[in-house]
Amino acid sequence: MKTLAIVLFIATYLLLIFMPKYRTQVAVTVAALFVILGILPLNKLFFTIDWNVILMITGTMGIVSLFIESKMPAVMADFIIDRVNSVKWVVISLALFAGIVSAFIDNVATVLIVAPVAVNLAKKLKISPVYMIIAISISSNLQGAATLVGDTTSLLLGGFANMDFLDFFFFKGRIGLFWIVQIGAIVSAFILMYFFRNYNQPIHLEEKEKVEDMFPTYLLISMVLLLILASFIPNKPSITNGLICTVLLQIGLIKELLINKNRYALNTTLLQIDYQTILLLMSLFVIIGGITEVGVINDISNIFLKIGKNNLFLIYSLIVWFSVLVSAFIDNIPYTATMLPVAAKIAAGMGIAPYVLYYGLLVGATLGGNITPIGASANITSLGILRNEGYEVKAKDFMKLSVPFTLSAVLTGYILVWVIWM
């Protein structure tokens, strides 16, 4: 049974690499095989899926859709542009703004919010928007690990390690991932300043967006505040955070339907939810539950322990930089979902707390996707926007900015996680 599970697991990863357009179908099919073949007992199927993570993702995606429709993000971008005096500082400001937004909103959604602002700006100035869009994309990816709701990988860590919203800021008396990511963002901002040093054209904003409805903004703020408050509730139900997000989404939809009389709100908002990612995650939970059941996770952790020769720093380094390498070419969601239990087993085998390995994993997996155009969904989305504008971006052109930006951020996180958590 273990051999069959390993074969299916390896086949899943190979298919995810070579058939990225069908990753959800691949994961669902393999998950079904795991249950049908008895690798994961049917009575454990429901409990293998982290419903808190699934509900949080669903609710957050819906609230973000309402937030984007309200035009508030565009107004915030206008506010920034109106206060700088050159293209260089507009690009850097928009990139940093995209990073801040993506700490609370999905990275792809962030790119869809901020990238059109940069495209319109480039048209007015008659310059190429390519590197402006790339800067926005990689900055949004950088901040994904900053908060519980910043990225799917953060949600996976929160669910697996039972971490709440505030735990990403301060955890067990030490600074958390949020501050580590911010320091990485400051370091990488110097890379942006150097790269765009010749973009000195003056800029003036003529047309400004207007907020159409403040209620989605209040919903988003309420979600963050309630997630913070939930952090203080002892022995709360395991799906508390998920319920907060989904209930707030329902409130937003009811308001749209009954008060705004928007009869298309339900369809519009619900269609914006990425059901493929949700199905992918549910399937991955099943697959990982199956390989855990037959002992594969133990075997993988033992391989790391053997290669690392029980040297924690060496194992930590392997996890960080292996994660960077892997996530540069394949989606970091299945990789992170697989490696979290591996990191836990390694830590248990060494008799240490697992957090240094968890954080190293997230730093490598979340930021590593920035290296190549196909390493992160936000990068693929940004290149799609440029393609629609008539710009075909080669990998080498993308990597002129992405490689130094990513390595500076990863190296910063790599050093800080070790220093703070060891």
Image (cartoon, grey):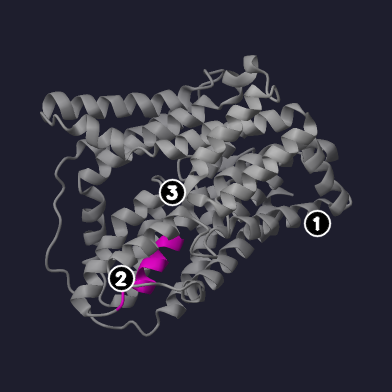
Magenta segment, which residues?
128-139
Residue ID for mark 1: 314
The disc labelled 3 sits on which kind of residue? Ala
Taking the magenta stretch, the answer to whether it contains residue 129 is yes
Give the residue at x 12% y 64%.
Answer: 207
Does residue 375 appear in the picture of this structure?
Answer: yes
* In-front residue for pair 173/14: 14
- Distance from disc 2 to disc 1, alpha carbons, whole Å, reads 41 Å
Mark 2, secondary structure of its residue? helix
Label of residue 90 in the image: 2
Q: Main secondary structure of the magenta part?
A: helix
Label of residue 108 in the image: none
Q: Residue furthest top?
A: 43
Quadrant for the N terminus, please. Answer: top right
Q: Is residue 167 left or right of residue 116?
A: right
* In-front residue for pair 252/418: 252
First in residue order: circle 3 vs circle 2: 2
